[in-house]
Amino acid sequence: MAISNRVKDFFKKISPSFLIDRYHFFFAFFSALFYGFPSKKMRVIGVTGTNGKTTTINLITKILEEAGYKVASLSSIKFKIRKNEWLNELRMTMPGRARLQKFLKRALNSGCQYVVLEVTSEGIKQHRHRFIDFDVAVFTNLSPEHIEAHGGFENYKRVKGELFKKTKNYHVINLDDENVEYFLGFEAKEKYGYKIRSRAKSPESNKRSPTSLVEAENSRVLPSGIRFSIENTDFDLKLLGRFNIYNALAAICVGFSQGVDLETCKKALEKAKRIPGRMEIVISEPFTVFVDYAFTPNALERVYQTILKGFVRKKLICVLGSCGGGRDKWKRPVLGALAAEYCNEIIITNEDPYDEDPMEIINQLASGAQEKAKKILDRREAIREALEIAARDDVVVITGKGSEPSICLAGGKKIPWDDREVVKEEFQKL
């Protein structure tokens, strides 16, 4: 594996960018051709955005299944074909072209009528979305991420827009996101916009408007979940955080686009359980321990705000790191600064260093947190330290990996890992 990755990196460096682009395009075509263009015989829903994709995919799947459809889905957490589920251990949110077409073919052979896919900017950049017939495109939100890989935020946004340019039937768009005007600009048979009524005037209100509007009223965020109403129908979900109201609204819009009624959407969403590694409570007594996937500044801030609003009675203790591999170095001090703003105790540790010096990554994070930061290279030791200093009614939040099953090191090496299991193991030793 190490040799393979070094060879790939070598050819990437010496090959012209247009040649690499053509390689990705034609590989996508031949992969679809080999598997018989399976997406043409199903309805495919693509979900894109910076945060919330995995949860939204899960909720869409629940709604379609409640309506009686046979559904497959693919997210950063798992592959699912009807009742058959297995972990996504690829460490790729959107698999490569051949693997993706193979998954679609397998879903078709299993009788699936719908497939729900997580569509990433890197996947679009490498043409993984090509030769897939998307019926619905969903936009969750947009904030700076993968900026260095795309050469700026506008390029990142433009790449996300490719999914909407390709999808001509239904568009589902978050009207409360500041980038809404761009995504409303693409042509579609029907556009569904969603928002929370308690918000200030939406950016699109005096410009383009969607065909249909889905608006959450009387929204409440509680320690037990979220509540809101749509058209006098009350929703009571077990999911935590205001951001999950948006994820639920996106899923409801997809349901509407496919003829699913509001009552069926309500039944499905109220059955939905919390997603592994997404605001997951691992320990609840004598203090609370959360594990969450948040790795962008926007997502991290939302996690901290949710916890402070509903759970912290004493101190908030955070454990965080940042991904290596040269990815978005700009955000490291920003993540550290956010931790300093919201947390009483900060432990900065290793995450997925890839080929970077993990201590250098930690130092960059610590530069944002400044004197509050405690640096511990070993992630298990960092988690142990957080648990040891936690007192009754404190909250510990461990971010960056969620339910990911490994830590990625240099040369393609991976070591088995699960933040949730490590928390349980170290808690038992206290």
Image (cartoon, grey):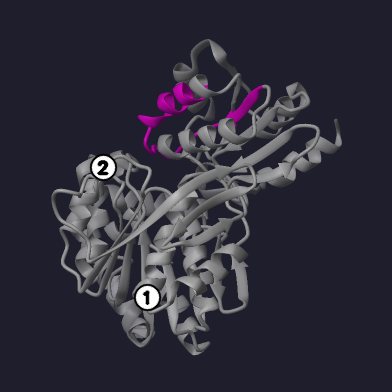
Residue 131: percent from left, percent from top: 28, 76
Name the residue beneath numbered marker 1. Answer: 44
Toward the viewer: 86 or 232? 232
Label 1 vs 2, first from the N-terminus: 1
Q: Is residue 187 left or right of residue 175?
A: left
Report whether residue 323 is seen.
no
Residue located at (49% from left, 20% from top): 341
Residue 335: percent from left, percent from top: 45, 28
Amino acid type for the residue under numbered disc 2? Lys
Magenta range: 315-339
Instruction: Tell me the SS state at disc 1.
Output: strand
Q: Crowding near pointer 1: few (<14 within 10 Å), some, many (20+)? A: many
Residue located at (69% from left, 32% from top): 383
Instruction: Tell me the SS state at disc 2.
Output: loop
Screen quadrant of the C terminus: top right
Q: Is residue 222 above or below residue 376?
A: below
